[in-house]
Image: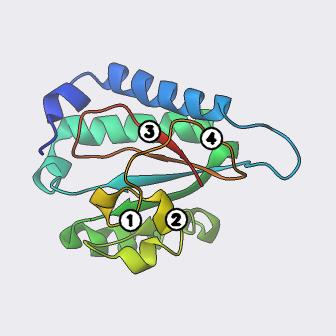
Amino acid sequence: GGMDIEKVFGDTEAFVRYRAKVMENTIALLKFEKGAAEVLTQVHDYSGVLTSMYKSDVKNGVGAISKVFAEHYPEFKGKTVFVNFPAVFSKPFQALASLLPERTRKKFVILGQDDHEAMFQHVSPELVPVGLGGLLQEPRSALTSKSHMAIPRARDVVDVSVLEV
């Protein structure tokens, strides 16, 4: 289904509060023990968002949350895997990324449509929902392992499920 851009991004402050709450809830699941997860990996599904990426509400929301995460959660920032990323944006993103420090560039993984093999180099297929080409039938509700991941779906207006990795 299509994402309701106005509902998700129409109120930038509400969007930032929502994403910060998801981050806080995910951080609360970390154990902060030796050998336990120290960073979070996020997978963003960009299916069907080609035209919405041009809208100012989307740019404002993404810019605002990026700033909040950089300023307030840098120690938790692991990789962000963008799946089903529109090819038309891939080259411009790579050009802009070349200006970023290498350490920052390594935190972003851009994958095209149905690029499952590359995604599985970062996330086990057993932990990826079937809708994204993985084997996970139903997201689990509790985290118990050493690594954690949140999968927000760009095309849906739903709560983010937190999965064990």
Q: How crowded is the residue under tag 4: few (<14 C-alpha within 10 Å), some, or many (20+)?
A: some
> Which amino acid type is marked by label 2?
Val
Q: Nearer the viewer, residue 143 or 105?
A: 143
- 2 and 4 marks in contact (CB < 8 Å): no
**N-terminal-most mark, 4 or 3:** 4
**What residue is pinned by disc 2?**
123
Which of label 2 and label 4 is nearer to you?
4
Location of the N terminus by quadrant is top left
- Residue 64 is situated, as x and y percent measured from the top left of the image, at 40, 34
Residue contact between numbered discs 4 and 3, judged by CB atoms under 8 Å: no
Between discs 2 and 4, the one toward the N terminus: 2
Tell me residue 44's x, y (percent): 37, 53
Q: Earlier in the sequence, mark 2 or mark 1?
A: 2
Task: Give the residue number, with chain letter if any, for mark 1.
Answer: 134
Question: Which residue is drawn at the image coordinates 67% and 49% (left, top)?
Answer: 39
Disc number at residue 143?
Answer: 4
Asked if disc 3 and disc 1 are in contact, CB closer than 8 Å, the reply is: no
